[in-house]
Structures are given as C-alpha cells and as structure tokens.
Image (cartoon, rainbow, N blue to C red):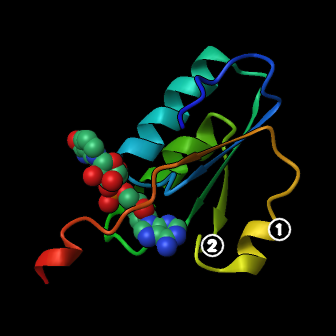
Amino acid sequence: MYTKPNKMHKTIIITGGAGFVGSNLAYKIKNKYPKTSLVVLDNLKRRGSELNISRLEKIGVIFLHGDIRNKEDLNSLLPYDLMIECSAEIGRAHV
Ligand SMILES: NC(=O)c1ccc[n+]([C@@H]2O[C@H](COP(=O)([O-])OP(=O)(O)OC[C@H]3O[C@@H](n4cnc5c(N)ncnc54)[C@H](O)[C@@H]3O)[C@@H](O)[C@H]2O)c1
C-alpha cells in the first residue's frame, strides 16, 4: 500500500533511498516538506548509488548504510511515521 507523504509525517524512511527512484523521491519530499525528518537507508549494492548521498545530505536528508534484510538495521530506524520501500536489485533475475 502506498500512503502519500504529507506534513503530518514527522519522520519518513525511504529504503533503497540512494537509488534512482528513492533518491528522487527523497529530494522531492524534502523540498515539499522541509521540516520533515527524512532518512534514507541503502546498502549501496547498486554501483553508483553512493553518488546520490552527498546531494541528499546537502538538503538535510540523513543517510544510513543498511540492508532491509537485516532485522537489526530495521529496528535501529524506529520510531518513524512512514516508510517508503524503494530498494531493489534491478536485473538480478538476468544474472
Ligand atoms: N527507474 C525507473 O524508471 C523505474 C520505473 C518504474 C519502477 N521502478 C521500480 O522502482 C524500484 C527501484 O528502481 P530504481 O531505478 O530506483 O533502482 P536502483 O537500483 O537505482 O535503486 C535501488 C536501490 O536499492 C538499494 N538496495 C538493493 N538491495 C537493498 C537492500 N537489501 N537493502 C537496502 N537497499 C538495497 C540499491 O543499492 C539501490 O540504491 C524497482 O523495483 C524498479 O523496478 C523503477
């Protein structure tokens, strides 16, 4: 289910947030709701995704290195109001 981010969401987590979709979403949300605390979690598995981190940090987005399959990484995120899942291993099925 997708819940549209709004100003009531004080803290938003975007998993896979250093990727193409996640980082662009983070950028748009932070610009629209600058008071929202926005955290992106990414394992940086996709080469090049690390290049998006500095762009996000410049606008106040917090980057956390982590993996959605790791329970400890997910538990360390609490509390939050909304999580948007954007992580993926694109093309993995073709390897
Ligand atoms: N790019 C597009 O135009 C587009 C269009 C429609 C749908 N989608 C879908 O959106 C999703 C994301 O696509 P994208 O283009 O942003 O891909 P992407 O590879 O740019 O981003 C995915 C991110 O997830 C991270 N990641 C992978 N496994 C992880 C894990 N276990 N834990 C944490 N992070 C992890 C990667 O490091 C990467 O930064 C995919 O499901 C894709 O099919 C993309």
Give x and y (percent) for residue 3.
60, 28
- Relative to 94, 8 lies left or right: right
Residue plotted at (62% across, 33% down)? 59
Q: Which mark is residue 58?
A: none
Any atom of ligand 1 within 8 Å of the CB at mark 2?
Answer: yes
Q: Image quarter for residue 60?
A: top right
Query: Observer-nearest residue: 43 or 53?
Result: 43
Q: Residue sitting at 65 percent across and 80 percent down?
A: 70
Q: Is residue 26 visible?
A: yes
Q: Amino acid at mark 1?
A: Ser
Badge 2 vs badge 1, beta-carbon distance below 8 Å: yes
Residue at numbered disc 1: 76
CA distance for labels 2 and 1: 10 Å
Residue type pointed to by label 2: Gly
Q: Residue at x 22, y 76 (%)?
A: 92
Looking at the picture, does residue 5 appear above or below residue 88? above
Q: Report helix, strand or loop for mark 1.
A: loop
Which callout, 2 or 1, points at the residue further toward the start of the chain?
A: 2
Q: Which quadrant: the N terminus?
A: top right
Query: Where does residue 55 sit, x and y in percent of width and height?
Result: 50, 43
Which residue carries the number 2 mark? 66
Q: Residue at x 83, y 30 (%)?
A: 10
Q: Residues within 10 Å of mark 2 (few under 14, many from 20)?
A: some
